[in-house]
Amino acid sequence: MAESENSSDMRQPSNSDAGPPKLSELLDRGWKIFKEVDCTDEPLGSNSIQVRLKRGIGMLEEASRMVAQLDLFSRNEELEEVATADLKYLLLPALLGALTMKQTSRGNRLGIVQTARAYFMDFLRRCKEYNISQFELPASTDEDTSGFDEASENGLSAAMVSGFQNRQDREPPQSGSTPSWSGSPVPIQ
């Protein structure tokens, strides 16, 4: 019975051929991947877990882009002004940070940690802006603030800008050297 449920879950993304996935579907799928990876006994470094992580991160990044396009959150509004159905999207940066921290890459661990930190800082900034809790934000590093103001003005999260910058900063391996990862990058579907 459980196997038939899993196989129907695997077919679920193919049902989205009729159109792009909805924002709520992306969040739900990303959350489900987070729970599966968080509760698994399989090593985080295994290929199947890393593939799931990349897929989940891709879904949550797409959801973040959709939230930015829809302007669901604004610095000018109070928490009470946010639609109840939209409150769950405040968690996107935290989920992205948690999934990012589970990635394993010996050659780029610092980049992974910096990207995750940017996601978590974005989450904390949103919590502070909406007065969800009273706390002091941790001190920012130059890397965290390098694109934040520009990104905020354009409706993009600082974490997305930081993640993009980290991807751009990576240099391809020099000829003759072996990459630290095995296999090829997995396209996000």
Image (cartoon, helix red, strand yellow):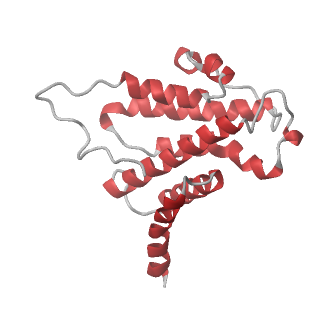
Of the pair 11 and 28, the residue shown nearer to us: 11
Relative to 121, is 51 on the left or the right? left
**Residue in the picture at 64% in, 31% down:** 122
For the image shown, how many numbered marks are present on the structure? Answer: 0
Name the spot of residue 162 as percent of width and height, x first: 51, 26
Vertical arrangement, residue 8 with respect to residue 165, above or below: below
Q: Please tell me in which quadrant of the rendered image residue 71 appears.
A: top right
| Residue 58 visible in rendering | yes
Relative to 149, is 81 on the left or the right? right
Name the spot of residue 170 as percent of width and height, x first: 34, 25
Of the pair 142 and 161, the residue shown nearer to us: 161
**Residue in the picture at 62% in, 29% down:** 156
**Residue in the picture at 48% in, 41% down:** 101
Relative to 134, is 99 on the left or the right? left
Query: Looking at this rendering, what residue extends furthest in the left direction?
Result: 176
**Residue in the picture at 81% in, 34% down:** 130
Name the spot of residue 7 as percent of width and height, x first: 44, 74
Q: Please tell me in which quadrant of the rendered image residue 10 appears.
A: bottom left
Of the pair 60 and 141, the residue shown nearer to us: 60
Query: Looking at this rendering, what residue extends furthest in the right direction?
Result: 80
Name the spot of residue 148 as percent of width and height, x first: 61, 20
Query: Looking at this rendering, what residue extends furthest in the front direction?
Result: 18
Vertical arrangement, residue 70 with respect to residue 38, above or below: above
Vertical arrangement, residue 120 with respect to residue 162, above or below: below
Relative to 26, is 81 on the left or the right? right
| Residue 114 visible in rendering | no
